[in-house]
Image: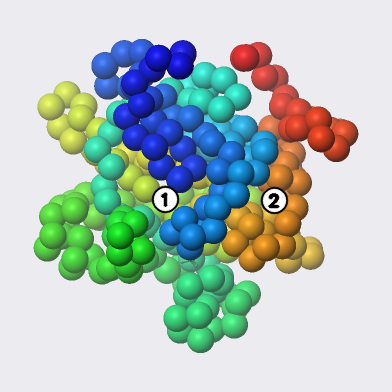
Amino acid sequence: MNRRRRIYEGKAKILYEGPEPGTLIQHFKDDATAFNNKKHEVIEGKGVLNNRISEHIFLMLAEIGVPTHFLKRLNMREQLIQEVEIIPVEVVVRNIAAGSIAKRLGIDEGTRLPRSIVEFYYKSDDLDDPMVTDEHITAFGWANPQELDDMMALALRINDFLTGLFLGIGIRLVDFKIEFGRLEENDTLRIVLADEISPDCCRLWDIETDEKLDKDLFRRDMGGLVDAYQEVAQRLGILAESRPAAGSGPVLVTDNSN
Ligand code: TMP
C-alpha cells in the first residue's frame, strides 16, 4: 500500500494512483488548516470522520442524480474515486451570512440572506483564492459557459438537498464550498461533483442552540472539533448512538474494512 504513487498532496487530503486506469484513491488526513495554511494542526480522528461523512453525502447526492467522482469507500481513511480534471474554481453557496460575506458586506453573522447566493473563488494558494465572477471564469477558460451553467445548477440542487437533509437532523446549513471536475465519458466531457463535502467545508449550526458543528471551531480557536464532527456523523446515522469513551476515537457503524 505504501508503494502507491502519490499524485497530489493537498492540505487535508492526498491523492494516490488507483488500482485501475482512470481511478484514484482519495486519502483523508487529520490535518486541519485555515487562512491558506497559516494556521495548521493535526486533529486526531478528523480524517476518519470526514471520509465517512463525505461518503454518506456523495452517495445520497448520487441517489438524486447528482453525478459525482465517488466510487466506493475503501477503508477508514480512503475512498476510490474517478480521476477527473479539477475545474480551478471553488463554488460557495450561502444561505445565511457568516464568515467572509459578513465581513465583506458588513452583514451581521446569522442574518438570513434574501436568497441563496452562489460565489466563485479562483483556486490559487499563491493568490489566497480570490473571489471571481463568471466573466473571469469563461474569459480565462477555467470553464466554458455550458460547464459554468452545469456547475451553478448542480450547486443549487446540492444546496436544496443538503439544506433539507441537515434540517431533518436539527442542523442549519449556513454555507458550503464544493468543487467540480471534468469526467471523460464516451468521448464527451461531463461536469461531476468532486473533492469532498464534510464539516471542513460547510458551516453547520445546531438549530436550537446555534452551536457550531464545523471547522469554524478550529478557525476561531474554539476547540471541540472532533466532538462536533462526531455529533454530525451520529445525527446522520453514521456513528453508533453511544458516545465512545474519551480517547478511544470514533466508533463507526457497519465498518467492515481495515
Ligand atoms: P468564507 O465565508 O470563509 O468565504 O467560507 C465560505 C464557505 O466555504 C464555508 O463553509 C467554509 C468554506 N471554505 C472552504 O471550504 N475552504 C476555504 O478555503 C474557504 C475560504 C472556505
Residue at (20, 60) in percent of width and height: 137
Question: Which of these two is toward me, 115 or 195?
Answer: 195
The answer to whether 227 appears left or right of 181 in the picture is right
Residue at (74, 32) in percent of width and height: 250
Amino acid under disc 1: Ile
Q: Position of residue 176 (x, y in %)?
A: 50, 57
Q: Position of residue 33 (x, y in %)?
A: 52, 53
Specify the quadrant of the image occupied by residue 48: top right
The answer to whether 126 appears left or right of 199 in the picture is left
Mark 2 crowd level (few <14, some 14–19, many ≥20, 10 Å Cα): many
Q: Secondary structure at mark 2?
A: helix
Residue occupied by mark 1: 178
User: Looking at the image, what colour scheme do you see?
Assistant: rainbow
Q: Secondary structure at mark 1?
A: strand
Residue occupied by mark 2: 225
How many angstroms separate mark 2 from mark 1 (CA)?
A: 21 Å
Q: Disc 2 or disc 1, which is closer to the eye?
A: 2
Q: Position of residue 235 (x, y in %)?
A: 73, 42
The answer to whether 40 appears left or right of 19 in the picture is right
The answer to whether 55 appears left or right of 83 in the picture is right
* Label disc, if present, on residue 93 of the rendered structure: none
| Residue 119, above or below 186 | below
Mark 1 crowd level (few <14, some 14–19, many ≥20, 10 Å Cα): many
Is residue 63 among what the camera can see?
no
- Dots 2 and 1: beta carbons under 8 Å? no
Q: Position of residue 66 (x, y in %)?
A: 40, 39
Amino acid under disc 2: Leu
Question: Which of these two is toward me, 131 or 220?
Answer: 220
